[in-house]
């Protein structure tokens, strides 16, 4: 009976029902859009982090030879060559291949490219004088771009899940020429160490968006309470019980709110999983439709609880007060709150990305980095460096680099000095923030099971291990396995050293890999900025529409006596524009602090007042957009206002 009465009330108030439905559908669209995009990013990293434990490049073996040692996940028969894109030449690994993660293989219809963020689907690239169409561009952690064609090269790149790494290494030493071989030990599966940080990073953006969305929901609920107060008074005057009044009061609203949110789930997921297409980001992500479901369940429960809270209001309100109730206008404070929360969420996401982009454009005191066996490294020019992974500093796992007492990396110091004794250490800035260290503090480093105390004498902004590595003086028990050099022709030197079986990165390779990783972060950041802006616009629309509807008799009288709509426009502009300006400026410094915190989840970012000043021109554009939108909404709502019907109400 009560449900049928609520449905009848819903049919009578179609316009308000449609408004509430659209509001909650839009909020659901935004939340699932963001969650699906975040889920796709998490899935991309998670897939990589579990697919294999051995990666190598060799000549003289085939995939069939490797099946005895485990499962080959990704492989590419390649030769190094030049590809031309938009008039620029790039060095790439070109050949026939098949990858399970991402799921691509060579095709006669065109080429697939990996680790090549400059390309996107549909581009034309030139290989050996022939043009090919790019069928897809995929994220892959590799120092050089990989281009999948139908031509089979002489070298084999393989990433596999190996059962016996020692037996595989012995087989390759006996039957192949190995250019590169790397085993990811237990506990150091590729990319797994950073997966938790990345999840926390991208989920921070969801919480920012959720805060803005909840604010809109609260405002809608308040508006609903205001618009139905007189109805509550009439029903209570007729002697109906509070439970029945509550059913009519929120039953229709709850039904529409839940239906609206549910209606936005699937479209939001679909849009979020393909968000990179809309921004032309050259990063293909797999959909992750299950990730948002648990959050949707919590949000739906929150809607039920939030909508049910007015029961207290219904039970406590006095009949005479309800009958005398006159709807009030949304104050300047309401508009200010909306803009403050919206700008806080969007600006925090923006500043976190700005800080990370600064680190992606790093400089280094070398342009070629070679890694390999000690016998080959000692023959190279440049600075020889020892290396240990998986070591511990005050309980935190990190990487340790062993340098000379005189090193080119002294140029990376931002505080203190380079070490001069065996018990001194230089710590990268990310590790100092993680452990709250400063120059003069002591640390306990566990190297190969032996714990030793070092005094921190310097802080470096070098980029190793996400800026969280430890630099120590050279030790006799650690042989040099790395060489850093500065040469005139880094690509030529790289080709020569790789021919000797060394693993080599140029400075351009490192920057390109950083740009690839940056693509992963841009997806959730852009999603939050876009959706938060739309939420704020929708909130402005909702407040204007519901205020005019709740006071429609007043505005009908204004129209009836000939007051132009421009008077109403100025009334709302006097609230939206000043509150947008005040809200954005008030949110500027807190958003910088919040963006700094979010960015430091991953990397030791730094922000300055100059970064805040750069957004001021964009803010002025947004003020104009909000003003134009306010005028548009007022004109639309006033045009549809039925004066006769409103005056008869």
Image (spheres, helix red, strand yellow):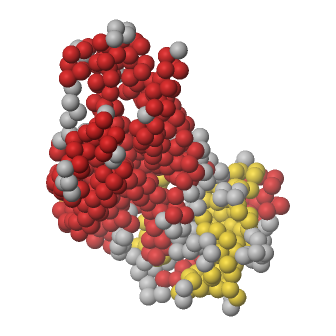
Q: Which residue occupies 61% across, 78% down?
A: 123
Q: Which residue occupies 78% across, 75% down?
A: 108
Q: Which residue occupies 42% across, 13% down?
A: 244
Residue nearest the viewer, comparing 315 with 648? 648
Query: Whole-percent x and y of residue 500?
Result: 62, 77
Residue 397: in sight, yes or no? no
Q: Which residue is at the far bottom?
A: 129
**Is residue 345 positioned above or below 119 on the image?**
above
**Picture quarter with the C terminus:** top left
Q: Quadrant of residue 547?
A: top left
Along the horizontal axis of the image, is 26 left or right of 43?
A: left
Residue nearest the viewer, comparing 388 with 432? 432
Residue nearest the viewer, comparing 529 with 597? 529
Residue nearest the viewer, comparing 141 with 588? 588
Along the horizontal axis of the image, is 113 left or right of 648?
A: right
Residue 3: in sight, yes or no? yes
Query: Whole-percent x and y of residue 166?
Result: 69, 52
Q: Quadrant of residue 310?
A: top left
**Is residue 99 positioned above or below 340 on the image?**
below
Q: Which residue occupies 59% across, 85% down?
A: 84
Query: Whole-percent x and y of residue 506?
Result: 48, 76
Query: Whole-percent x and y of residue 639?
Result: 34, 54
Total numbered labels placed on residues in the image: 0
Q: Quadrant of residue 623?
A: bottom left
């Amino acid at each position: 009976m009560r449900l049928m009465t609520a449905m009848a009330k819903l049919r009578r108030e179609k316009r308000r029902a449609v408004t509430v439905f659209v509001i909650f559908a839009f909020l659901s669209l935004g939340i699932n859009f963001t969650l699906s995009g975040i889920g796709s990013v998490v899935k991309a990293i998670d897939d990589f982090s579990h697919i294999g434990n051995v990666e190598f490049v060799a000549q003289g073996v085939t995939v069939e030879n490797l099946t005895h040692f485990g499962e080959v996940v990704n492989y590419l028969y390649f030769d190094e060559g030049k590809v031309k894109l938009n008039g620029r030449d790039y060095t790439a690994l070109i050949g026939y291949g098949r990858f399970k993660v991402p799921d691509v293989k060579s095709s006669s219809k065109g080429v697939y490219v990996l680790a090549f963020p400059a390309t996107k689907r549909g581009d034309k690239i030139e290989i050996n004088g022939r043009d090919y169409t790019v069928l897809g561009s995929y994220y892959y952690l590799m120092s050089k771009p990989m281009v999948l064609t139908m031509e089979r090269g002489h070298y084999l790149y393989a990433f596999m899940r190996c059962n016996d790494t020692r037996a595989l290494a012995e087989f390759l030493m006996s039957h192949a020429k190995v250019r590169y071989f790397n085993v990811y030990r237990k506990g150091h599966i590729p990319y797994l160490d950073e997966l938790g940080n990345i999840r926390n990073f991208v989920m921070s953006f969801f919480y920012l968006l959720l805060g803005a969305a909840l604010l809109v929901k609260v405002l809608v609920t308040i508006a609903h309470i205001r618009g139905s107060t007189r109805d509550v008074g009439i029903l209570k005057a007729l002697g109906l019980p509070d439970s029945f009044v509550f059913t009519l009061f929120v039953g229709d609203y709850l039904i529409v709110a839940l239906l609206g949110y549910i209606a936005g789930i699937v479209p939001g997921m679909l849009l979020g999983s393909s968000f990179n297409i809309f921004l032309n980001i050259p990063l293909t992500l797999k959909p992750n439709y299950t990730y948002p479901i648990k959050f949707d369940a919590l949000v739906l429960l929150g809607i039920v609880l939030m909508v049910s809270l007015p029961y207290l209001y219904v039970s406590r309100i006095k009949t005479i007060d309800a009958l005398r109730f006159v709807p009030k206008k949304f104050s300047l404070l309401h508009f200010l709150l909306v803009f403050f929360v919206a700008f806080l969420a969007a600006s925090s996401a923006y500043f976190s990305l700005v800080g990370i982009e600064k680190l992606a454009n790093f400089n280094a005191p070398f342009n070629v980095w070679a890694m390999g066996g000690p016998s080959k490294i000692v023959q190279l020019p440049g600075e020889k460096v020892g290396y240990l992974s998986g070591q511990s500093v005050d309980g935190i796992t990190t990487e340790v680099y062993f340098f000379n007492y005189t090193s080119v990396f002294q140029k990376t110091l931002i505080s203190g000095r380079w070490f001069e004794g065996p018990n001194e250490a230089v710590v990268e800035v990310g590790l100092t923030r993680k452990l709250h260290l400063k120059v003069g503090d002591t640390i306990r480093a566990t190297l190969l099971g032996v714990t030793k105390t070092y005094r921190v004498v310097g802080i470096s902004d070098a980029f190793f291990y996400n800026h969280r590595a430890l630099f120590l003086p050279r030790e006799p028990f650690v042989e040099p396995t790395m060489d850093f050099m500065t040469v005139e022709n880094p690509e030529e030197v790289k080709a020569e050293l790789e021919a000797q079986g060394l693993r080599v990165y140029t400075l351009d390779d490192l920057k390109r890999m950083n740009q690839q990783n940056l693509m992963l972060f841009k997806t959730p950041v852009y999603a939050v900025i876009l959706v938060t802006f739309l939420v704020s616009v929708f909130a402005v629309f909702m407040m204007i529409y519901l205020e005019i509807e709740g006071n429609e008799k007043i505005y009908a009288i204004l129209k009836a006596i000939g007051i132009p709509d421009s008077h109403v426009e100025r009334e709302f502009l006097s609230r939206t524009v000043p509150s947008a300006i005040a809200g954005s400026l008030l949110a500027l410094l807190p958003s910088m602090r919040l963006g700094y915190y979010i960015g430091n989840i991953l990397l030791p970012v730094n922000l300055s007042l100059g970064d805040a000043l750069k957004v001021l021109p964009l803010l002025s554009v947004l003020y104009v957009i909000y003003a134009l939108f306010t005028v548009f909404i007022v004109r639309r709502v006033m045009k549809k206002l039925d004066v006769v019907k409103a005056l008869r109400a």
